[in-house]
């Protein structure tokens, strides 16, 4: 822990935000004065209730739980020294660090999202492989909305006008929000978050930021912190930034595409290509596993009721688990690449997904495909939207599929799978109580 002590002392840090990602990827934790943070390093003094990992996106808790004790006992937080960063939007020097949860006997909280991703990564290590991922994250900038019953509006850019049409990859359209984008890049540089390129996406005021490839845990940490940065940069300019999967009814949804590959730990060789540079048998098994299990894993990559509004035909989002070479209409796309960069892109995940669980889920599906030697279907040429809808259409259906997928639940962990189902079923029940404006508009006087 001397690394943490030296880091905060060298930067004269005033206080430290000790963060844990919950089931929804929301940052929870404690803000600690720097002196107390340093004094407590190596101890079990930084504590939270076990139930912090069973909160719903609304802040509620499941009424009954087979995982979390009804007394909600203490766990302690252990900061990961590799995640210490500045919080770039404060005037005073404040640090943020991601923590892992442990019970007081030293055992990890095995249903915490960060532990679940570590668990899946470890399975690949036991086979001699290292997983590599590169996420692409889309989000919308929106005018501040203080009434949740009102539709969202596009914000005003530097021209003084609202964007009215779709300007995918438009440079001038992207320049409309240059002040915010510059702050995002500056914040990311200050916080040591390794983002790559930015582009305007198909929706009005919709942007995409790509991350450089790397270790899944490191990238999940970066995405987790990046979302905080984007929201704060937008607020600085009197706007909101949202990672909702489908914030506008007539605009495309926002995705978190996840590129993934495997390399041998000893040699660094990409095992998705054989010696002749062609797709390896292992790669095809990996794709086969994604095809077999990603439908059951949908609650982890599309975790909210709103997520399934994005999954629609001809909406820049896939509707099935077909795969194809350089085919963006497929749920699984294999970009044209040299053997060293052979990879598959999972296009199903929404930007609203918890990055730890989305990466754990997609890697777990590929892992099961390798273990079970799953054979993929034939690659699709042409429009994959011409095929039947092959994914769950709503959250309830997705949760049912996940609940009946024993191999996937076993790999992710029994306690996690139970806790996740408890949280998501509670959220779904809460959603079902809400009467929408569509129902009032179309049913109130007509049925």
Image: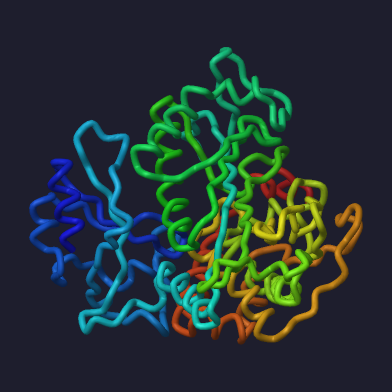
Residue 311 in view (yes/no): yes
Q: Residue at x 51, y 73 (%)?
A: 266
Residue 129 relative to residue 110: left or right: right
Whole-percent x, y for residue 175 in the image: 58, 21
Residue 299 in view (yes/no): no
Whole-percent x, y for residue 191 in the image: 35, 42
Q: Residue at x 52, y 28 (%)?
A: 143
Give the colour scheme shown: rainbow
Q: Is residue 49 above or below residue 97?
A: below
Q: Find residue 292 and report its image quarter.
A: bottom right
Whole-percent x, y for residue 431 in the image: 55, 60
Residue 433 relative to residue 332: left or right: left
Q: Is residue 251 above or below residue 236?
A: below
Q: Residue at x 51, y 57 (%)?
A: 214
* Residue that protrudes farthest toward the top in the picture: 159
Q: Find residue 234 and report its image quarter.
A: top left
Q: Quadrant of the N terminus?
A: bottom left
Which residue is more in the foreground, 49 or 343? Answer: 343
Which residue is more in the foreground, 168 or 280? Answer: 280
Q: Is residue 89 above or below residue 72?
A: above
Q: Residue at x 81, y 53 (%)?
A: 327
| Number of disc labels | 0
């Amino acid at each position: 822990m001397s690394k943490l002590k030296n880091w905060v002392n060298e930067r004269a840090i005033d206080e430290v935000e000790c963060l844990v990602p919950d089931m929804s990827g929301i940052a929870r934790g404690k803000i600690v004065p720097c002196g107390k943070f340093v004094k407590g390093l190596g101890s079990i003094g930084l504590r939270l209730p076990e139930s912090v990992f069973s909160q719903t996106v609304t802040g509620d808790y499941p009424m009954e739980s087979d995982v979390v004790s009804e007394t909600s006992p203490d766990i302690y937080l252990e900061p990961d020294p590799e995640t210490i960063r500045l919080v770039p939007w404060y005037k005073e020097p404040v640090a943020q660090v991601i923590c892992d949860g442990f019970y007081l006997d030293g055992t990890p909280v095995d249903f915490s999202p960060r532990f679940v991703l570590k668990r899946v990564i470890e399975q690949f290590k036991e086979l001699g492989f290292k997983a590599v991922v590169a996420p692409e994250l889309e989000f919308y900038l929106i005018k501040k909305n203080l009434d949740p019953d009102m539709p969202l509006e596009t914000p005003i850019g530097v021209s003084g006008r609202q964007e009215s049409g779709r300007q995918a990859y438009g440079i001038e359209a992207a320049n409309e929000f240059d002040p915010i984008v510059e702050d995002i890049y500056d914040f990311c540089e200050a916080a040591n978050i390794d983002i790559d390129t930015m582009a305007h996406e198909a929706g009005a005021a919709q942007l995409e930021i790509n991350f450089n490839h790397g270790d899944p845990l490191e990238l999940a940490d970066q995405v987790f912190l990046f979302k905080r940065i984007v929201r704060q940069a937008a607020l600085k300019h009197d706007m909101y930034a949202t990672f909702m999967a489908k914030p506008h009814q007539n605009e495309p949804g926002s995705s978190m595409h996840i590129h993934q590959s495997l390399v041998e730990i000893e040699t660094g060789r990409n095992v998705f290509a054989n010696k002749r540079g062609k797709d390896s048998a292992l790669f095809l098994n990996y794709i086969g596993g994604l095809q077999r299990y990603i439908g059951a894993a949908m609650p982890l990559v599309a975790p909210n009721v709103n997520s399934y509004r994005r999954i629609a035909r001809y909406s820049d989002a896939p509707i099935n688990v077909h795969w194809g070479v350089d085919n963006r209409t497929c749920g699984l796309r294999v970009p044209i690449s040299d053997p060293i960069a052979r990879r598959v892109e999972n296009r199903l995940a929404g930007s609203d997904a918890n990055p730890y669980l989305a990466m754990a889920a997609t890697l777990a599906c590929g892992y099961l495909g390798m273990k079970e030697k799953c054979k993929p279907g034939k690659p699709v040429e042409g429009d994959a939207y011409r095929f039947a809808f092959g994914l769950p259409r709503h959250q309830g259906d997705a949760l049912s599929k996940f609940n009946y997928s024993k191999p996937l639940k076993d790999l992710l962990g029994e306690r996690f799978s139970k806790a996740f189902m408890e949280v998501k079923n509670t959220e779904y029940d809460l959603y079902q109580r809400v009467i929408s404006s569509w129902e009032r508009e179309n049913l109130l006087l007509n049925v």
